[in-house]
């Protein structure tokens, strides 16, 4: 059984890269452009992991995590935040919003996969 | 198969152009006084996303610049810096440099830091950010080392130890996870102790590598679970580092009645022998740092912990918080009863049946259930793609455009053949052909739509030209744009860039007066240049307007005389004088400025526009300003034409140039000389041109009474009446350029193939009229405004 991952990022390049790294690792990958789209895509899914960017139009990563966590069925889904900052302030904020972990951009695909495995087996 | 990273890289640069566009838009809005958070966010995100991708491709220069720009924008976003118009100007400059850097990165070029750094320093100084933040950036270009052939979960090259990504319960290989779920119960936990005497540091494994020994006490807090973390996976990650022995401390697990399914009661003691160092071990717990009590001891300290470990259970509770959770439990019990059915229980809170449970076994069952549910949901799920767009090679589109062109010709030929069979109008063939005609048109329009793009990208480039040239000339200039969403053929947009750039420079340099002069004449100090685009009767019209001093016609005239472009006594209308600007070698600048004196004159602009099948005209009011108007065909591929006969030749006249057609009567004609006539139409007089004679097909006729004329109109209102022998048809024709295979012919725009296979020339009526009237110098070009 392959892991199912939802990746949310408003940058097409970043989505392409996530898609490449994730599918190459054998994960079933779903992509969304922002928080609102992410919730649409998530509807009917129960991915093993969600990866989300923070700065996005319409609904940013914090809002998205909040919306995901507010649904009983998605409460336990590990959520990794994509961030260009390694600053601890942002991690604290991400965690406060309900994130499970974080990936610092630019990401190394093997680290990405490792992080996913870390939170989703 | 092409390199997927190369493809993403190419698409990154396409995305960058879009981001740069929204960056420009956002800054423009800020400049217009919008300071709402979304506007600022758009700007921030654009820079941020450019940086993100640049980092992935190791484009260090771009990352550095974008990072500092982003940092500044973050200050704005956070409200710590409120930009004034000077700051926004600087942001624009940064956006320009960012655009340069993007393009340089794309083309493997380098932009020296001597250009980027001063701007950044000014930026930092103004915003109050410092350079040191730069150190935070991690340059780690994404290197994909993919096992593309393998596919599936097995494509994980550097993650040994997990035969499949399936959930743990499915794994038969649990033996190498001693102490975890399949441990029957606590007695055996005890029997697993004492742990093998902690081997001294420095012991080596079979391969001869140095082994480090760690004893890890891991006691999750409740918040660890609510953040979506899972101790099991952390243990597995540890297992991937080397040999582990795990024991679970269940001593604080309450009875079912007291159990809060949302809380965690377990902690773990892990013995790890690994080649990795402590930092790597600690990294496993990166995400749960602060969400658990964690103690990682190296071999040196092991003895102490081992002592603890052999101690009776209660003392094993390392740092859990049994007291607080226990205290809260009674209050929570009713609520738990309410929510229990809906809750997916956390593994470690799996039903503990009584005080002597076998917690690990039941939690294993939970995992089975969970993974089964996971499998189910993944089976029904289909991967979702982002909203669909397709990137297509321009060549493919061009091929399609060509084929559609052939289709149009073919359809015309078929129509002609059918017409020759004299089938009744209502025959199925005729009606079918009608539909075919309609479809062909639809297909053609759709194909043209593919090539069309909003002219916005071009306009944005112009805003930079205005900024740069006004800065260089010390003028204060604002660019206004309108109709940015007007769609124009991609090729036209590309080929318009140079002429438009020159026109904009011209407007800033020559069109607008100096600030002092503006103030002196009571004008607003800030000069305005307006760029507009719109569709007008099947053409694109682009106007470049300045609110400067207007054309000084006396000066233009004097220059033209000095340069012997016109005779000293030439009688010229205002329009004639204005048009002198388009003559080769004409320059009105007294001193050659940096900007305009580049050897490129308006004549080059004009020929570039003509090359696009377009026209350019000027209107100027002294003291008020000047407008240059470019009119372009919507597409370079087809046009609607009127097929006419002249001296036995078939010609096509673009329909959009024709105002009306009429048959001449004696009253319409006025002779101005032996071979010069004007036509009086609705109160206006327009020159009469015999097309056959103009093109050299025949000598001018003596009388044109009863002949058919096409009244041709131009953007500037100039008109002429073209004499033709007969009008055959109106139809769409495919433009086949002459310039590539033959050369430019005055008065001829292109050629086409008609339905009967005949080749016909397509007239450029306006060019023809200018040529002809320029030559014959018919004095009253347009005596009054018609209609």
Image (cartoon, rainbow, N blue to C red):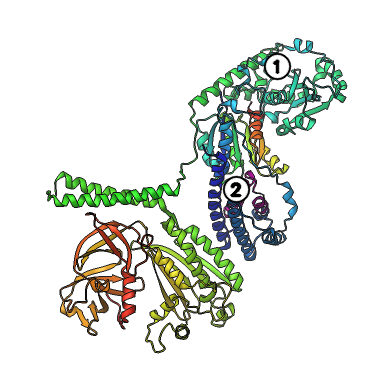
Left or right: where B611 falls relative to B25:
left
Which image quarter: residue B492?
bottom left
Of the 4 image quadrants, the one containing the C terminus of chain B is: bottom left
Element type where label 1 sits in the image: helix
Q: Chain of mark 2?
A: B
| Residue located at (41% from left, 47% from top) | B396
| Residue located at (64% from left, 53% from top) | B77
Which of these two is toward me, B449 or B378? B449
Eyeballing the image, is B388 above or below B306?
Answer: below
Left or right: where B325 falls relative to A70:
right
**What's the magenta bit mostly, secondary-structure-wise?**
helix
Q: Which residue is mark 1?
A: B176
Mark found first going from the N terminus, 2 or 1: 2
Which of these two is toward me, B376 or B695? B695
Element type where label 2 sits in the image: helix
All told, the count of numbered labels is 2
Bounds of the magenta segment: B38-67
Eyeballing the image, is A27 above or below B659?
Answer: above
Which of these two is toward me, B131 or B377? B131
Which of these two is toward me, A20 or A85? A20
Question: In x, y percent, where is residue B547?
Answer: 49, 75
Q: Is B286 part of what is drawn in magenta?
A: no
Which image quarter: residue B374?
top right
Numbered tag placed on residue B215 in the rendering: none
How far apart marks 2 and 1 lie (CA) works out to 44 Å
Residue at the far front: name it: B742
Is residue B49 visible in the rendered image? The answer is yes
Other residues around mark 2 within 10 Å, as few (<14) / some (14–19) / many (≥20): many
Question: In x, y percent, where is residue B413?
Answer: 23, 51
Is residue A10 visible in the rendered image? The answer is no
Q: Which residue is mark 2?
A: B49
């Amino acid at each position: 059984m392959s892991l199912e991952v939802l990746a949310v990022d408003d940058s097409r390049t970043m989505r392409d890269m996530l898609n490449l790294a994730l599918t190459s690792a054998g994960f079933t990958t779903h992509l969304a452009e922002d928080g609102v789209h992410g919730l649409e895509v998530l509807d009917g899914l129960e991915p093993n992991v969600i990866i989300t960017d923070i700065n996005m139009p319409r609904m940013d990563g914090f809002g998205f995590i909040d919306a995901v966590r507010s649904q009983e069925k998605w409460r336990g889904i590990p959520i990794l935040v994509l961030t260009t900052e390694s600053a601890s302030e942002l991690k604290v904020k991400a965690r406060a919003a309900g994130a499970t972990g974080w990936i610092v951009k630019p990401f190394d695909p093997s680290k990405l996969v490792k992080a996913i495995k870390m939170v989703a087996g | 198969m092409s390199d997927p990273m190369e493809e993403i890289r190419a698409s990154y640069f396409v995305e960058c152009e879009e981001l740069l566009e929204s960056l420009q838009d956002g800054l423009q809005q800020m400049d217009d006084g919008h300071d709402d958070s979304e506007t600022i966010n758009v700007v921030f995100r654009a820079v941020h996303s450019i940086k993100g991708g640049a980092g992935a491709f190791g484009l260090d220069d771009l990352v550095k610049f974008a990072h500092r720009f982003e940092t500044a924008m973050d200050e704005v976003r956070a409200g710590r810096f409120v930009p004034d118009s000077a700051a926004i100007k600087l942001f624009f400059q940064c956006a320009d440099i960012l655009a340069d850097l993007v393009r340089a990165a794309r083309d493997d070029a380098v932009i020296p830091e001597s250009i980027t750094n001063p701007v950044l320093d000014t930026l930092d100084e103004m915003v109050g950010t410092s350079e040191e933040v730069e150190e935070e950036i991690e340059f780690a270009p994404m290197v994909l080392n993919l096992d593309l052939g393998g596919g599936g979960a097995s494509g994980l090259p550097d993650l040994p130890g997990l035969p499949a990504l399936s959930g743990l319960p499915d794994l038969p290989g649990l033996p190498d996870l001693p102490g975890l779920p399949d441990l029957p119960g606590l007695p055996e936990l005890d029997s697993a102790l004492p742990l093998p005497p902690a081997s001294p540091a420095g012991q080596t494994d079979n391969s001869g590598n140095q082994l480090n020994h760690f004893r890890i006490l891991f006691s999750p807090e409740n918040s660890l679970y609510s953040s979506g973390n899972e101790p099991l996976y952390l243990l597995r990650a540890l297992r991937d580092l080397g040999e582990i022995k795990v024991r679970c401390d269940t001593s604080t697990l309450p009875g079912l009645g007291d159990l809060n399914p949302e809380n965690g009661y377990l902690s773990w003691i892990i013995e790890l022998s690994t080649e990795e160092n402590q930092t790597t071990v600690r990294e496993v717990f990166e995400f749960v740092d602060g969400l658990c009590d964690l103690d990682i001891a190296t071999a040196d300290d092991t003895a102490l912990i081992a002592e603890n470990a052999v101690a009776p259970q209660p003392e094993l509770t390392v740092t859990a918080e049994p007291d607080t959770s226990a205290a809260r439990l009674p209050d929570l019990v009713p609520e738990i009863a309410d929510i229990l059915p809906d809750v997916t229980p956390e593994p470690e809170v799996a039903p503990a049946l009584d005080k002597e449970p076998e917690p690990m076994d039941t939690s294993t069952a939970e995992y089975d259930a969970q993974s089964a549910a996971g499998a189910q949901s993944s089976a029904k799920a289909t991967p979702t793609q982002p909203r669909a767009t397709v990137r297509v090679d321009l060549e493919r589109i061009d091929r399609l455009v060509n084929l559609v062109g052939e289709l149009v010709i073919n359809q015309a030929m078929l129509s002609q053949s059918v017409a020759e069979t004299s089938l009744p109008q209502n025959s199925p063939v005729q009606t079918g052909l009608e539909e075919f005609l309609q479809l062909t048109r639809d297909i053609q329009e759709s194909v043209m739509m593919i090539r069309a793009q909003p002219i916005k990208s071009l306009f944005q480039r112009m805003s930079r030209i205005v900024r740069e040239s006004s800065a260089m000339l010390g003028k204060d200039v604002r660019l206004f744009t309108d109709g940015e969403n007007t769609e124009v053929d991609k090729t036209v947009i590309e080929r318009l860039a140079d002429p438009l750039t020159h026109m904009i420079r011209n407007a800033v340099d020559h069109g607008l007066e100096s600030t002092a002069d503006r103030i002196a004449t009571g004008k607003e100090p800030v000069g305005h240049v307006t760029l507009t685009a719109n569709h007008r009767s099947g053409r694109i019209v682009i106007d470049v307007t300045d609110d400067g001093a207007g054309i000084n016609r006396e000066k233009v005239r004097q220059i033209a005389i000095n340069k012997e472009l016109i005779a000293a006594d030439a009688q010229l209308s205002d329009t004639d004088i204005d048009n002198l600007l388009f003559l080769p070698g004409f320059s009105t600048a007294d001193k050659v400025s940096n900007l305009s004196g580049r050897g490129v004159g308006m004549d080059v602009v004009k020929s570039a526009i003509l090359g696009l099948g377009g026209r350019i005209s000027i209107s100027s009011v002294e003291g008020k300003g000047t407008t240059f108007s470019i009119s372009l065909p919507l597409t370079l591929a087809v046009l609607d034409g009127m097929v006419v006969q002249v001296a036995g030749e078939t010609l096509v006249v673009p329909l959009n140039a024709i105002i009306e057609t009429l048959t001449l009567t004696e009253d319409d004609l006025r002779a101005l000389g032996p071979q010069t006539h004007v036509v009086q139409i609705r109160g206006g007089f327009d020159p009469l041109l015999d097309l056959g004679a103009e093109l050299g097909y025949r000598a001018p006729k003596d009388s044109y009474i009863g002949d058919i004329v096409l009244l041709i109109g131009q953007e500037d209102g100039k008109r002429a009446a073209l004499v033709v022998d007969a009008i055959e048809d109106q139809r769409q024709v495919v433009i086949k350029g002459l310039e590539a295979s033959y050369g430019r012919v005055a008065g001829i725009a292109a050629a086409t193939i008609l339905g009967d296979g005949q080749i016909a020339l397509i007239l450029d009526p306006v060019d023809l009229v200018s040529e002809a009237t320029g030559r014959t110098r018919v004095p009253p070009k347009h005596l009054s405004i018609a209609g």
